[in-house]
Image: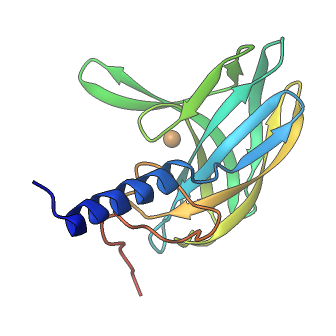
Amino acid sequence: MYTNTSRLLVMGAVILLNIGALGVAQQFKGNSIVIEQPWVRATPAGAKVAGGYMTIINTGSEPDRLIGGVLPQAGRFGVHEMKMNGNVMQMREVERLEIKPGQKIALSPSGYHVMFTDLREPLKQGDTLKGQLRFEKAGTVDIEYQVEGIGAQGPHQRSAENPHQHSTDAPHQHSH
Ligand SMILES: [Cu+2]
């Protein structure tokens, strides 16, 4: 049986969850291509490699292909795929990543992702990094990556009013 107070607490929790779900997904557009919530993992000092993740949607009627990109902090940009080879997870470079009409491809730590190599400086959690993606048809699309924690599995939902509040997240790691 609920008392009035505990019922209020439950309602409060439900409202908080709803706000989380309504968090503003960051979108970037170039013609028929929509990029949602690009993020990268922070890197420890001295690391030369970082992974980049996002959702790519093709809203057009023709296939398009991701063929390259730029991150000023990195010397090189590549598109990678994680694939099981027997029991071993292997990473290989793909020349172009096709996005079919109507298709939505999630780039994540366990599948396709973009890989930045020859890093010139560490990527710091909490920063926003401007970058570009290049598509065969849509051309160059300007995007912004949010830098998440070193072990992050996905982007944080950010609400419009309070972009950095994480009510239910595990404590963040701070290296300083
Ligand atoms: Cu990779």
Q: Residue 136 at what x, y percent from top left?
A: 85, 26
Please give the name of the residue rendered at 73% of the width and 46% of the height, measured from the top-left corner.
27
Q: Residue 130 at what x, y percent from top left?
A: 76, 61
Q: Is residue 115 above or below residue 129?
A: above
Q: Residue furthest front?
A: 4
Picture quadrant of residue 3: bottom left
Q: Is residue 84 above or below residue 108?
A: above
Q: Residue 40 at what x, y percent from top left?
A: 56, 55
Res 156 seen here: no
Total marks shown come to 0
Picture quadrant of residue 158: bottom right
Q: Nearer the viewer, residue 3 or 20?
A: 3
Res 94 seen here: yes
For the N terminus, the quadrant is bottom left
**169 relative position to 54: left or right:** left
Please give the name of the residue rendered at 70% of the width and 28% of the height, measured from the top-left corner.
57
For the C terminus, the quadrant is bottom left
